[in-house]
Image (cartoon, helix red, strand yellow):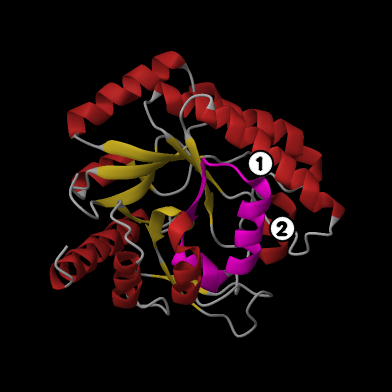
Amino acid sequence: MESWPLGVFASIDAGLGVCLDVAHQLGVKTIHLHTPQQESRTEGQAREFLAQLQDIGITITCVFGGFEGESYADIPTVKETVGLVPPATRSARLAEMKEIADFARRLGVDVVGLHIGFVPHEASDPDYREIVAVTQDLCDHAAAQDQAIHLETGQEPADTLLQFLGDVDRKNLFINFDPANMILYGVGEPIEALQKLGPHVRSVHCKDATWSDAPGVNWGAEVPLGEGDVGMEAYLRTLQTIGYTGPLTIEREIPQEPARQKAEIAGALELLNSLKNKLHT
Ligand code: MG
């Protein structure tokens, strides 16, 4: 595969990212797929879906998990609702995440991503050990079918994430690096974080954002790629430095404005293509 194939975050039914036909119209060849809803994760649907993808020449490089009841409305709501961290839904979501991994397997995809949620920043927090155990359980389920688990960055500073990876201690656990999330959640400079996390980064999102005036308390703002505080050229140069050659997957979460979303992703593709040429990849 060529270095840095361009991609986009996409979904089949209600989910994050753009619809498949938009991905096709944009001419991308790889996608991160936001998992379809539970009733669509059948063997038959997987076959049908794979045939459709083959027709349009698109490869899924990662299936992203997501759960009913998650909300990204603001930072406190994310803490309460997202991923495997909220205690009330933890065991049910672990079971569902395993099902999502099984569905990814049916699609022939060996990478499963997720936002695990707000891992407590103190390893002494009693909840921390439990979240480590749940993550080990998920990794072991994935390893048994030759899959890797990629944790999306965002809610933790790089050092907390490194400690967490070390404590989970599984060979199939890696990072999906999203530079904009570091800014949106106010957990650190993305380029510095990428340098620290480098050896663990196995997939990435290309997304941009501006810092809020109260980082960590209020969201920053997600903006079109190249217009935020990430610094796309520095981002790609750092990816080059850490030896990352996998897909560059564009994420733009404004599903309420599909026409604008498509136009901005087209702009992002143009920007990434010109930077790829500049950096001679
Ligand atoms: Mg992302």
Q: Which mark is residue 192?
A: none
For the N terminus, the quadrant is top left
Relative to 154, does residue 183 appear above or below in the rendering?
Answer: below
Q: Which residues are magenta?
A: 158-184
Q: Which residue is mark 2?
A: 79
- Residue 267 lies in the magenta-colored region: no
Q: Secondary structure at mark 2?
A: helix
Could you classify mark 2 by the number of other residues whose Cα lies within 10 Å: few (under 14), some (14-19), or many (20 or more)? some
Q: For residue 251, say whether it is visible.
A: no
- Label 1 and label 2: CA atoms lie apart by 17 Å
Residue at horizontal 32 percent and vertical 69 percent from the top: 241
* Amino acid type of the residue tagged 2 in the rendering: Lys
Relative to 9, does residue 177 appear above or below in the rendering?
Answer: below
Residue at horizontal 50 percent and vertical 69 percent from the top: 196
Rendered image quadrant of residue 59 = top left
For the C terminus, the quadrant is bottom left
Nearer mark to the viewer, of 1 and 2: 1
Q: Which residue is mark 1?
A: 135
The image shows residue 227 at horizontal and vertical percentages of 35, 77
In this rendering, would 102 be left or right of 107?
Answer: right
Residue at horizontal 78 percent and vertical 59 percent from the top: 123
The image shows residue 235 at horizontal and vertical percentages of 35, 71
In this rendering, would 204 be left or right of 125?
Answer: left
